[in-house]
Each structure stands twice: as C-alpha cells, then as structure tokens.
C-alpha cells in the first residue's frame, strides 16, 4: 500500500497508466492517463491545486513500474 496520495500505476499492455488517488482511506480510480496532460487534467478534476508542480514530488506522487512521465506500453 502506498503512503502517498497519488499513484500512477505501471503502463498497461495497450499503453496508458491508471491513476488513483487516496481519499477518505479509499483508493479512487481517476482514469487512464496517456500523457502528463491527461494526468494533470485528472488531478485538477479531483481538486488538486497546481498538479503540474506535484508530478515530480515523491511525497505526493508515486510512479510505479517504469520511470515517471513514460506512458507507452512496457
């Protein structure tokens, strides 16, 4: 279980990364991001202020499976 509120999961076989946010003790799926832009849009929709500034902050975002900002199938 992650200790950060936002998790960008490993890319799926068809590309894109599932994005989850922890709220009220539950993981909520925001969607599948295919780019940093998609990720920012999801986080803005979830009420995260200035999400672009958080993407590389390990206290806020955990990138799983492959390096950050990689969205194509592994």
Image: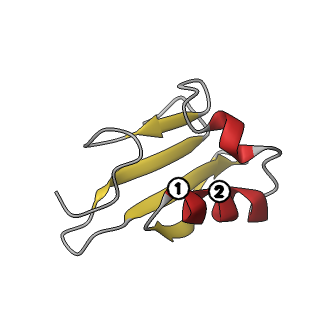
Vertical relation: 3 (above or below) 27: above
Which residue position holds label 2?
40
Q: Residues within 10 Å of mark 2 (few under 14, many from 20)?
A: some
Secondary structure, mark 2, is helix
Q: Looking at the picture, tell me which residue is in the foreground, 50 or 31.
A: 50
Picture quadrant where residue 15 is located: bottom left
Provide the residue designation for mark 1. 36
Q: Say which quadrant the C terminus sits in.
A: bottom left
Q: How is the image coloured?
A: secondary structure
Q: Is residue 49 left or right of residue 21?
A: right
At 18% from the left edge and 69% from the top edge, which residue is drawn?
A: 13
The residue positioned 27% from the left and 62% from the top of the image is 72
Q: Tag 1: Cα neighbours inside 10 Å, few (<14), some, or many (≥20)?
A: some
Q: Residue 43 falls in which quadrant of the image?
A: bottom right
Residue 61: x %, y % from top left: 54, 36
* Residue occupying image coordinates x 43% and y 67%: 34
Name the element at disc 1.
helix
**Relative to 1, residue 10 above or below:** below
Q: CB atoms at circles 2 and 1 under 8 Å apart?
A: yes
């Amino acid at each position: 279980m992650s200790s950060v509120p936002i998790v960008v999961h490993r890319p799926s076989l068809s590309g894109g990364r599932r994005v989850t946010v922890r709220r009220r003790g539950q993981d909520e799926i925001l969607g599948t991001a295919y780019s940093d832009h998609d990720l920012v849009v999801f986080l803005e929709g979830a009420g995260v202020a200035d999400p672009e500034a958080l993407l590389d902050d390990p206290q806020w975002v955990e990138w799983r499976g492959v390096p950050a900002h990689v969205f194509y199938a592994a």
